[in-house]
Amino acid sequence: MELYAEKITFSKKPISIPPEYRPAYTIGLIVLILKICCQGSKSSLLKLHLINWALKSDENRNSLRKFVLSNYTESSKTWGIEPSLNRALNFSIHEGICSITNGKYQLLEKGELFYSKIIEN
């Protein structure tokens, strides 16, 4: 069977992307986590991933709460690393929203301003 085509065209079609995979949403979440959940607006990568995982569902949140309230003796669900969070962290650093020093992510002045704008809305 032979195929002949003089011209092949591709057209870009809009697709819906879930909010948790949109960089702007995830950057906003990073800012909120650093400001509200972390002492001195500073956190390790693993802590950011843990809190991000906990915010994904009520089941995850309850599992983490049970683990913490048991003084870390109860077992907890296995949580994972989210590649979209890593990408958003890279964007955040590039945009001056946060920085990384000695393995800790810290909110910068621009991140504090972003937090204020989020809270206003």
Image (spheres, rainbow, N blue to C red):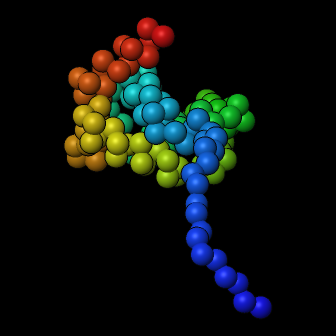
> Residue 120, relative to residue 18: is it above or below?
above
User: Who is closer to the viewer here, 9 or 80?
Assistant: 9
User: Who is closer to the viewer here, 15 or 75?
Assistant: 15
- Residue at 38% of width from left, 23% of height from top? 35
Splitting the image into 4 quarters, where does residue 45 fall? Answer: top left
Left or right, 90 with respect to 17, comes to left
> Residue 27, relative to residue 91: is it above or below?
above
- Residue at 44% of width from left, 28% of height from top? 28
Left or right, 94 with respect to 49, comes to left
Report x, y in % for residue 98: 29, 34
Residue lying farthest to the front in this orientation: 6
Which image quadrant: the N terminus?
bottom right
- Residue at 61% of width from left, 44% of height from top? 14
Report x, y in % for residue 101: 22, 43
Report x, y in % for residue 50: 52, 41
Is residue 41 at all visible to an observer of this figure?
yes
Splitting the image into 4 quarters, where does residue 100 fall? Answer: top left
User: Who is closer to the viewer here, 114 or 36?
Assistant: 114
